[in-house]
Image: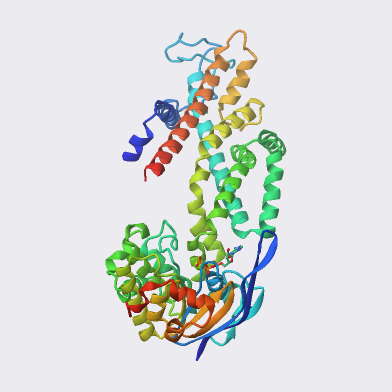
Amino acid sequence: MNRLRRFLQTPEAIAGAIILALLIVMALAAPLLFPGDPQAIAGPALLPPFQDLSLPLGTDRLGRDVLAELFHGARTSLAVGLAAAAAALLIGSVVGTLAGFAGGLVDDVLMRITDAFQTVPGFLLALAFVSIVGPSLGVVVAAIALGAWTGPARVARAEVLSIRERDYVAGARVIGMHPLEIAFREVLPNALPPVLALSSVIVAAAILTEAALSFLGLGDPNRVTWGGMIAEGRTVLRTAPFLSVVPGIALVLTVLGVYLAGEGVVESTAVRRSLS
Amino acid sequence: MTVLAVSNLAKRYRRGGKPFAAVDDVSFEIGRAETLALAGPSGSGKSTIARLVLRLIEPDAGRIDFEGADFLALSGAALRARRARLQMVFQDPLAAFNPRATVARVLDDPLRIHNIASRAERPRRIAALLERVGLDASLASRAIHEISGGQRQRVAIARAIATRPSLIVLDEAVSALDVSVRGQILELLLDLQRQERIAYLFISHDLGVIRAVAHRIIVLDSGRVAESGDARAVIANPQSAIGKALVAATPRLTRSRP
Ligand SMILES: Nc1ncnc2c1ncn2[C@@H]1O[C@H](COP(=O)(O)OP(=O)(O)OP(=O)(O)O)[C@@H](O)[C@H]1O
Ligand SMILES: [Mg+2]
C-alpha cells in the first residue's frame, strides 16, 4: 500500500499507471466484450466512426469492426511485449551472470557473442529471424527477444562483477556451495534491481518492434495486431485516415504509458533507497 | 596432532606494474584445539594468508597440508566436500551474509550442502546450533539484517561449526564488535574450542585479544614472518622491531583476560 502511494507521487507515474490499467482492462475484456472472431466481417466496408452505435469506431476495408480489432490488438501487443521483454531479461540475466561470475574465457566468449548481437540492429535481427522461420506468435516473441537481451546482459554482468567480490560470496565458497548455485541463488537475485529497471524501455521497444513486424506483414496472420491494422489502413489513407490513426494513437499511448509507469517505479525505488 | 601445516607459502601481486610479495615464504603449523594468532600491521599479509589457507585464492608457491593431506591438490567436488572441515568467520558479519538471507537459511545451507541432516531434521539442527552459540531458537525466522551485530557474529560462528570443522579461520572476527560483546564472543570461542577441540587461525591487530585467546603467535612484517612463539612470551618480550612496535601501540596490555 505504502509502496503504491510512493509510486503514484508524480503526475507522470499516475498517467502511466492509468494508461497501463486501461490497456490491461482492454486486453482482458476483449474476449468478453467482443466474443466473436475480430477478423470476421461485421458490417458494411469503410463505415466511418460514430455513425453506427453497434460499430462505434466504424469498419475497415473488409467491413471488420475496428473497435473489436483495437481491443484484440491490445491483447497481442501486451502479450508479445511482455513475453519478449521477459525472455530478453531472462536470457540477459543468465548470460550476464555467467560471464561476470565465471570470468576468464567464458566471460570473453559470452561478451563477444553479446557484442556480435549488439552490432546488428535489433529490428533487422527480428526481421531476418521471422522471415526465415515464418511468422507465428512464438517466433515473433523469440525474434524480438533476440535483439533485446544484450542490454540486460551487460548490466547484469557489471553488477555481478562488483557483487562477486563481496564477503558473502567468499562465505558461500567456504561452506562448499557449488559455483552455479552461488551464481544463480546468491549473486543473481542481488544483481537484478538495475536489470529490472530496464524492463519498461524493453517492453516499450518490444511493443514497437512487434507493431513494425506486423506492419511489414511479418506478424502472426491469425491475430489482429495494431501494426497490421495500420498497414491495412494505409491503402485507404486518403479516404479513411481513421483506420491508421486509431491504432496509431493506441500504439503511441501504450508505449508512453509503459515508459512513464516504468520511470515511476524506478523513481519510487530510488527515493526509497536514498531515504533508507 | 597437526591439523594444518603450511610451508614456504608465497603470494605475489602487482603494484604499479611491479610484482611485490604480499606473502613471502611463510611456514607454520596448527595443532588440534590450538589457537595460532597472526599479528602484524595493516598490509602485512594476514588476510592474504587466510584466503590462501581457505583456497579462496591460489598461492604462487608453497604447500598446504590439511588434516594430513595435500590441500592444494584438491579441486571441484573433492575440494568442496573437504571445505566442511575448514571454516571461516569474517570481520563484518553483515557483509558476510547474503543481504536477502534469513538466519535459518544461512544455517540450512551448510547442513544441506554436506548432507549433514535430512530436510525434515534440519530445523531441529538449526535450533540446536543457535542454542549452542547462546541464541534463542526463535531467531531462526528473522532476516539477517534484523538482528544485532553481536547476534549476527554468533550466527556466523554457528554457521562455521555446523559442519563440525577441525579448523576455523577468524579474520578480525571480533574487531567490529563492542568491547562488552567482544568479551562474550571470545568466551564462546574458547568454550567451543574446549568442547569440540577446534583449532583457530586467529587474525587480529589487537594484542590484548590475542593474549587472551591464543596459544602461539606469528608476527608478520611485509608478508614475512618477523617472529613467532608462545603468545604470552612474545607479547611480554618481543624480539623483532615490528613486534616491539605493535606492543608499544597497545597501551592496555597490562590488563589481563577479557
Ligand atoms: N587482490 C589484490 N591485488 C593486489 N594487491 C593486493 C590484493 N590483495 C591484497 N593485496 C595487497 O597485499 C598486501 C597484504 O594485504 P592483506 O589484506 O593480506 O593485509 P592485512 O594484513 O590483512 O591488512 P589489514 O590489517 O589492513 O587487514 C597489501 O599491501 C595489499 O594491498
Ligand atoms: Mg586484513
Q: Is residue B87 left or right of residue B68?
A: left
Q: Is residue A129 left or right of residue B37?
A: right
Figure disc tally: 0
Depth check: B254 or B207 in front?
B254
**Residue visible at 53% across and 15% down?**
A59
Q: Position of residue B139 (x, y in %)?
A: 30, 65
Rendering quarter of residue A26: top left
Depth check: B131 or A94 in front?
B131
Rendering quarter of residue B189: bottom left
Q: Is residue B221 left or right of residue B129?
A: right
**Residue visible at 55% across and 48% down?**
A90
Quarter placement of the N terminus of chain A: top left
Q: Is residue B147 above or below residue A230?
A: below
Q: Position of residue B173 (x, y in %)?
A: 42, 70
Q: Is residue A126 above or below residue A108?
A: above
| Residue A113 seen in this snapshot | yes
Depth check: B33 or B97 in front?
B33
Q: Position of residue B142 (x, y in %)?
A: 32, 60
| Residue B115 seen in this snapshot | no
Q: Is residue A228 above or below residue A205?
A: above
